[in-house]
Amino acid sequence: MALPGPNVRDGEPVVRLHQVAKRFAGGTEALAGFDLAVAPGELLALLGPSGCGKSTALRLMAGLAEPTAGSLERRLPAPHAVGFVFQEPTLMPWATVERNVALPLELLGLPRAEIRRRVEERLVGLGLGGFARAYPRELSGGMKMRVSIARALAARPRLLLLDEPFASLDEITRWKLNDELLDLWQREGLTIVFVTHSVYESAYLATRIAVLSARPGRILGEIAVAAPSPRGADYRSSEEYLRICRAVSTKLAEALGKS
Amino acid sequence: MKRTLTNALPPALVVLLTLAAWEAVVRLRHVPEYLLPGPLRIAAALRDDWPALYPSLLQTLAVTGEALLAAAVLGAGLAVLLMQAKWIERSLFPFAVILQVTPLVAIAPLLLIWVKDVRLALVLCAFLVAFFPVAANTALGLQSADHHLLDLMRLYGASRWQVLRFVRLPSALPYFLGGLRISGGLALIGAVVAEFVAGTGGAASGLAYRILEAGYTLAIPRMFAALVLLAGSGVLLYALLSGLSYLVLRRWHESAVRREGVLSSG
Ligand SMILES: Nc1ncnc2c1ncn2[C@@H]1O[C@H](COP(=O)(O)OP(=O)(O)O)[C@@H](O)[C@H]1O
Ligand SMILES: [Mg+2]
């Protein structure tokens, strides 16, 4: 059923969650009976109503939290082969852009010269070339988010997790960054899991869309997106795009109806 | 430059007018000098008694400075220590609070008995009052680190030391500096209170001793001169610590940055 994107290689899932449940100390059950397998090279969108456990699922995949039931397998060459982009840019305000991007590499103990080279490469790749010495507060929201993505990519992850990364940005910046994300995904052979509550965003970006139910979250349905890459403005006005949006909206309505 | 001038003018005028009114009242109503000397008389006392006042000023400032330095180092150190484990925090924090709520005047006599070296005892007293704001503020700052940044540290398997160095200490810096600003004034007060209790003359005689001495001999203008030095020291200390805070935080912290347009958008 899963359709091959440009990067899809044969192979075992990068992350597989089987009948996963997550109950918090306060008693909130965020996830229950959650089944999901992330195929290598896909761009998976997790879509669901607010508070349904999307962030929780992402944190489980990152290894930042443990499931209370069920099993979670991760097939990654190293624990740090995961990049995480939070909803807020979450930069260190006291550090320059280049120091922020260098953080993962410094933590991994790479040699200075190597760190400088990789940071430089990332900054240029994300259009941050002139801002290496700037402090986060001197940047606009979109630029801060670029820094956050550059940081997540600095350690060359295999799996990139993004938690509603562009939700607080204006529409224009948002679509621009979406295109850049698609670009990165194609160039780098990344596997991406992307949380969003925007039907249009998910239909534009994803090779597969998983719709979550209201809390406790589980996968309500999956929609494969066959559209070719690269996608662009043309795709966004195509019949196929509208069809996907409609299908996703219907699923989402189902999720909301049950809450 | 012009901006600085217009900013500084009103407060300077207010101060001048206040002093003029003070001088006028003292002169016109013939207030005796042993009740309230006028500003000019105090200035004269400051000039005449400078040879005695100056060493005392240095003495008080030295005690204050040493106490503040110790409070900064040990306060921040304790905050880091408290953060290492809940049980450490639970067992040590009460001591810090007890020290904080016990009035210095009540413990100073004991300290002066226990510690033979008077000067060391003075520093210890001033340290005790200056210590708490630094420790409490730094502890709060260490806990206030952005949780997502802490998540990021976990993602890359950062060690406890790395978390401290890359995230917690920088997060705590504005809090530490805020605590230090409060502690500066407290250290000065602590030094003066301890000097009052000690009442020592000779080598360890600070400004408080000059005030006591002037009181005994009813040299009221001299007393005011010592008070002026004391207040001036307090203001200067506060300004210095504020300046330090500004210098360290000016590039990134909201408390210090000047509002200007952003560099870029989009
Ligand atoms: N650390 C936590 N402790 C307790 N409850 C939590 C915690 N994190 C999330 N929750 C709760 O779990 C539910 C799902 O949260 P989340 O995964 O953030 O939802 P989403 O990202 O889909 O909006 C929410 O009801 C939220 O309040
Ligand atoms: Mg969320």
Image: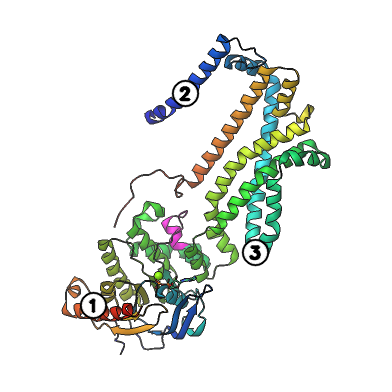
Answer with left or right where residue A154 lies relative to residue B182: left
Q: Nearer the viewer, residue A153 or B250?
A: B250
Choose top left, top right, bottom left or bottom right for residue A19: bottom left
Residue B109 percent coordinates (x, y): 79, 38
A89 is higher (above) or lower (below) than B218: below
CA distance separating discs 1 and 2: 69 Å
Q: Characterize the local packing of mark 1: few (<14), some (14-19) or many (20 or more) Cα atoms within 10 angstroms.
A: some
The residue shown at (76%, 36%) is: B119
Q: How is the image coloured?
A: rainbow
At mark 3, the secondary structure is helix
Report the magenta residues as a range: A88-102
In the image, residue A204 lies in the stretch drawn in magenta: no
Q: Is mark 2 within 8 Å of ligand 1?
A: no
Count neighbours of disc 3 (C-alpha within 10 A) and say few if under 14, some if 14 to 19, many if 20 or more.
few
Q: Is residue A126 above or below residue B216?
A: below
Callout 2 environment at 10 Å: few (<14), some (14 to 19), or many (20+)?
few
Please name the residue shown 54% across and 35% down the image. Answer: B239
Residue A59: give x, y in percent of width and height.
46, 74
Image disc number at residue A245: 1
Q: Are marks 1 and 2 in contact (CB under 8 Å)?
A: no
Residue that mark 3 sits on? B86
The image quarter in which residue A5 lies: bottom left
- The amino acid type found where label 1 is placed reads Cys
Q: Report ligand 2 position as a quadrant.
A: bottom left
Judged from the image, the secondary structure of the residue bearing numbered disc 2 is helix
Distance, label 2 to label 3, CA atoms, is 52 Å
Residue that appears at 79% across and 36% down: B118
Give the camera-side residue of A88 and A42.
A88
Q: Which residue is mark 2?
A: B14
Residue A60: assigned label: none
